[in-house]
């Protein structure tokens, strides 16, 4: 019995550390604030958008479809957000690579949408999620995504 108590006392710090050491993450409140900023920028510019926010695992936290936007933009926004979170970089990087010589090989990457409008969301230098915007031109989608991430 005495050995068991000593063993438990020796292991206790490991269990306590495991419970208190957590990685930053994106909350529903964060996703709402980010989506609100994207919608405000979209409305200010007169653009109708689909706004998707994903967590660090690529799972949807929120999806907002503004009135009048084409249905196809739902899947495009989701694809942009997945690309940004899976590859930890803006989708504009892939769009620019497609324009370079030999860039067509980017089209063979799984889960890579090479259209501006997807951005990773970072907290303390760690990717905690991503946003995907679709509904206008890719440059306009990028403007809205940048405004949304800036609000975070």
Image (tube, helix red, strand yellow):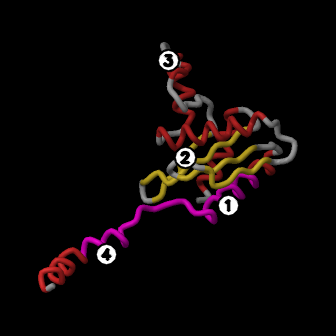
- Cα–Cα span, label 1 and label 3: 36 Å
| Mark 4, residue position | 16
Q: Nearer the viewer, residue 5 or 47?
A: 5
Q: Residue furthest bottom?
A: 2
Q: Are marks 4 and 2 in contact (CB under 8 Å)?
A: no
Tell me if residue 102 comes above or below residue 63 in the rendering.
Answer: above
Q: Earlier in the sequence, mark 1 or mark 3?
A: 1
Q: Earlier in the sequence, mark 1 or mark 2?
A: 1
Q: Callout 2 environment at 10 Å: few (<14), some (14 to 19), or many (20+)?
A: some
Report the span colored magenta.
13-40
Q: Earlier in the sequence, mark 4 or mark 3?
A: 4
Element type where label 2 sits in the image: loop
Element type where label 4 sits in the image: helix
| Mark 3, residue position | 105
Q: Which mark is residue 32?
A: 1
Element type where label 1 sits in the image: helix
In the image: residue 90, left or right of residue 49: left
Q: Nearer the viewer, residue 74 or 6?
A: 6
- Cα–Cα span, label 4 and label 2: 29 Å
Image coordinates of residue 144 in percent, x first then y, are: 68, 46
């Amino acid at each position: 019995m005495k050995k068991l108590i000593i063993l438990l006392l020796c292991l206790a710090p490991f269990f306590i550390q495991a419970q208190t050491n957590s990685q930053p993450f994106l909350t529903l409140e964060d996703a709402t604030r980010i989506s609100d900023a994207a919608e405000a920028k979209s409305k200010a510019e007169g653009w109708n958008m689909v706004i998707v926010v994903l967590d660090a695992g690529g799972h949807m936290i929120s999806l907002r479809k503004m009135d009048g936007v084409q249905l196809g933009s739902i899947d495009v926004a989701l694809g942009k957000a997945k690309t940004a979170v899976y590859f930890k970089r803006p989708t504009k990087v892939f769009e620019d690579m497609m324009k370079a010589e030999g860039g067509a090989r980017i089209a063979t990457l799984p889960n890579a949408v090479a259209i501006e409008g997807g951005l990773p969301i970072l907290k303390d230098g760690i990717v905690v999620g991503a946003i995907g915007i679709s509904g206008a031109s890719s440059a306009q989608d990028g403007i809205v995504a940048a405004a949304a991430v800036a609000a975070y």
